[in-house]
Image (cartoon, rainbow, N blue to C red):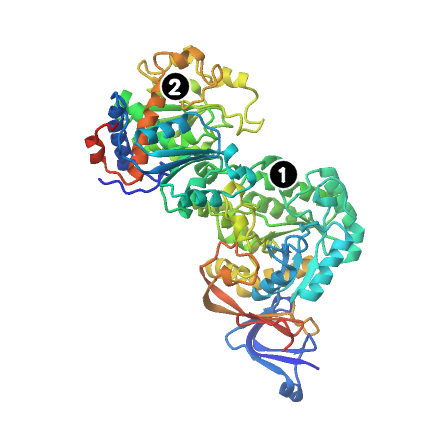
Amino acid sequence: MAHLWISNARVIDPASGRDGQGDLFVTDGRVVESFSDAQKQQAQKIDAHGLVACPGLVDVHVHLREPGQTHKETIQSGSHAAAAGGFTTIVSMPNTSPVADNAGTIQLMKDTARRDAVVHIYPTGCITVGQKGQALAPIGSLKRAGVVAITDDGDCVQNNELMRRAVEYAKMFDLPVMDHCQDTSLTQGAVMNEGVMSTRLGLRGWPNCAEDIIVSRNIILSTYTGAHIHLQHISSRNSVEIIRRAKARGIKITAEATPHHMALTEDALSTYDTHLKMNPPLRTEADRKEIIAGLRDGTLDIIATDHAPHTDYEKDKEFDFAPNGIIGLETALSISLDVLVNQNGFSLPFVIDLLTRKPAELLKLPAGTLAPGAPADICLFDPEESWTYDAKNGFSKSRNSPWHGQTLKGRVRTTIVAGRVVFSNGKIITSPA
Amino acid sequence: MPWTRKHLLTLEELSLAEIDHIHQTAAAFKKILGRSVKKVPALRGKTIVNLFLEPSTRTRMAFDMAAKRLSADVISVDAASSSTTKGETLRDTAQNIEALNADMIVIRHAASGSPLYLSKILDIPVINAGDGAHEHPTQGLLDTFTMKEHLGSLQGRKVAILGDVLFSRVARSNIHALTKMGADVTLVGPSTLVPHWFTDFGVRVSHDLRSALADAEVVMLLRIQHERQTSSHFPSLGEYTSMFGLNKTRASWLNPKAVIMHPGPINRGVEIDSELADGERSVILEQVTNGIAVRMAVLYLCSGGQTDYVTATQPTD
C-alpha cells in the first residue's frame, strides 16, 4: 500500500464544493477520506503550506504531433509539458500524420502514451476520412478504439449535409463532436483578424463572421439532431452572444475559450510577430472582453489551450508563411489566474472549475475531482509566486509562445498523477521514487 | 537635422521632418540628374543588392538606376533566379547576401512585414521596395515629392486616391505621408475595395466619385490588382470602369489645375481613360523620373550620408 499525504494546503475541489485549509490523503493512486496514525507514519509527505491543491488540470484541446510530426512535439514531450503546467489529463487532436481517422492510428497513440506519457492522454478521432471533409471516417470503430470525441480539427467540415450526418451518427455512440468553427470561403488567404489592424499592416483579414456562421450552423444542427456539439476556441464576441442565446433555449452545445484569446488582442501584432499568429486569430479588445464575460456567465464552459507546437524554424518566417498556433500547456494556469482572477475578479475556485471538473464532465473523463475514491490526479500550485517563463527551458519540444521571457504570477509546483509525483519543483520525475 | 535611420521600412514611422529631409535631399539629386554627367561618387565601393521576390519593372529599374548614379555596385536578384524557388527561407537568403558583404539590401516581397523581419536579422540597412499590401515607402515619397513640385505645400490640399485601396501598399504609404503633410485626403472606390477601417488613418472614405473628385487638386489612381483579389470584390472590370474609371467627364469635376497621378503599371481603359493617362494633366511619367532622385536620396541617407555632402558633390567620371 502506497500512501501520500499532502498537508496544510488550501484544498480547492469545485466538484465536491470543498475550499479550505486541509490535507489530502492518497492510497494506491486514489484519494481517500483520511489516514490512520499508522498510515500517516508510512506515508510520503508533502508539506503544501502556502500552496493550493486542486484536481489535476484537464485540457481537451492539445496537439501532440505524434505520429508523424515528432520534430514539433512527441507524446512524451507533450505529456511533460502538460505535467509542468499542472495538467494531468489531456485530450489530443487527430491532425497527426497520418491523421487519426482509423482505429490503428488510435491504437498506436494509446500504446505510445502508455509507454511514454506521464499524464493521462485521451485521443480524439477524425470526423471524415483523411480529415478532408468528404466522407465519414469509421466513427464507430474509432469509438471502440477509445476516442473520446471526434473532430476534424482545423479543417472544419464545410459541407452541411456531411456535418449533419456526422453529428447524428456520433450521437448514437454518445460521442461529442468538437468543431473548429470556420467558414473557409470567408478566410481564403487570411492570416489575422480583419479590421483596422489588418488594414494597417496590409495583411489579409479574417472576419469574425466566418466563425459566427459556423457557430450558428452547429447550433442549428444540434437543435435539429439533439447531438452534442462542442465549439472549440471561440474568439468572436458575436459568437459568444449567439451561444448565449442558444444555451438559454437549452440547446446541447458547449464551448471553450483559450488563454490567449482571453489575454491578448490583435493590437499585439504590430511587429508581425509570428508567435501571435494562430487560428482563430487574436481579435479586438471588444472580443476579448466578451470572451471573459462568456466565461463569467457560463456561456463558455471551459478553458482549453489549443497547445500547438511548431519549431523555431517553422515559425521564423514572413508572417504570411508561418504556421498557425502557439504552445500553451505550461502557461495556461498562470495566464488564466492573471486574466480572470487578478484582472477580472473571478474567484479562484471558479477558475479552477473551468480547468478541471467542467472539461472532465464535458467529455465524461474520469478526472476533475478530489472526492474520496477519485483518481489521485492533483495539482499543487503557488498562486502568489512570480516567475519568468523561459520557453527555451520548457518541456515542450517547441518554444512558440508569446509569453516567452515574461514574468507570470502563479506557478505549478507539483503535479501528481494516480498518486505518483510526476513533476516537482521544475523537474519531470519519470521513474517512481 | 542629421539623418539617423538605418532602414527605410515604412512611412508610418517617419516624422514630417524626416519626410522633408528626404525630399530636400531628393531635390538636390534631381539637379544632378539634369547634368550631362549624371553620376556622383557618393556610394562608390558600396554594393547594393536588389532582392526582388515579386515582379517589378519601374521600382526595380529606378532603384537600379539610383544606385548606379551614386556609383554603387548593384546586384539584382529576382524570385525566378533566387534559391527561394528551391525552398530557401528568406532568413537564409538574406544572411547569405550579407555574408557576401553586401552593404545594403533593397527588398520587394509579396509578404507584408518582410522588410521589418529582415531588418531584425541583418546588420546592413534594409530598404522596403514594396511589401505585400502594407507599404511602398519610396513610392509614397516620390508621389508626395511630385505633388509638392506642382502644388507647393500640401497643407490643406485636397487629394483623392481612387481605386483598389484595400490591396494597395502605394495607397497606405501615400496616406501616411499625406496626412503628416497636412493634406485633406479622400479615398474613393467600391465599398469592397475601400473598407471603412481606413477612416482610422485620418482620411475620409467615400464611394461617391463626384463628391470625392470635386475640386480635388490631385487624383491618384491605383491599379486594379487582379493578382491579389479574389473573384468577389467587384463584378467585372467593365462595371468597375463604368462606376469608377476616370474619364474626361469625371476629370472635369476636378480642380482645373489638378494633376493626375498613377503609380503604374496602368491598365489603360480600366481605371483610367487612355487619353487622360497621356494628357497634359497627367504627371505619371514625372513620377517615374522623380522616383530615381527620391531613391538616390533614400539609398544615400540610409547608408549614412549627410545632405551637405550631396550639394557639394561634383560629377564623377
Q: Is mark 2 on a helix, strand or loop?
A: helix
Write the residue at 60% across / 41% down.
A212
Crowd around label 2: few <14 · some 14–19 · many ≥20 (10 Å) = many
Type of amino acid at the residue the image marks with label 2:
Leu
- Give the label on residue A183, or none: 1
- Give the label on residue B213, or none: 2
Q: Are marks 1 and 2 on the same chain?
A: no
Q: In this view, does B226 lie to the left or right of A375?
A: left
Write the residue at 52% across / 32% down.
B80
Total number of numbered discs in the rendering: 2
Q: How far apart are marks 1 and 2 (CA)?
A: 38 Å
What is the x, y in percent for residue A93? 66, 53
What is the x, y in percent for residue A77? 61, 62
Q: Nearer the viewer, residue B256 or A93?
A: A93
Quadrant of residue A134 within the rendered picture: top right
- The chain holding disc 2 is B
What is the x, y in percent for residue A25? 64, 78
Write the residue at 31% across / 39% down.
B302
What is the x, y in percent for residue B259? 34, 18
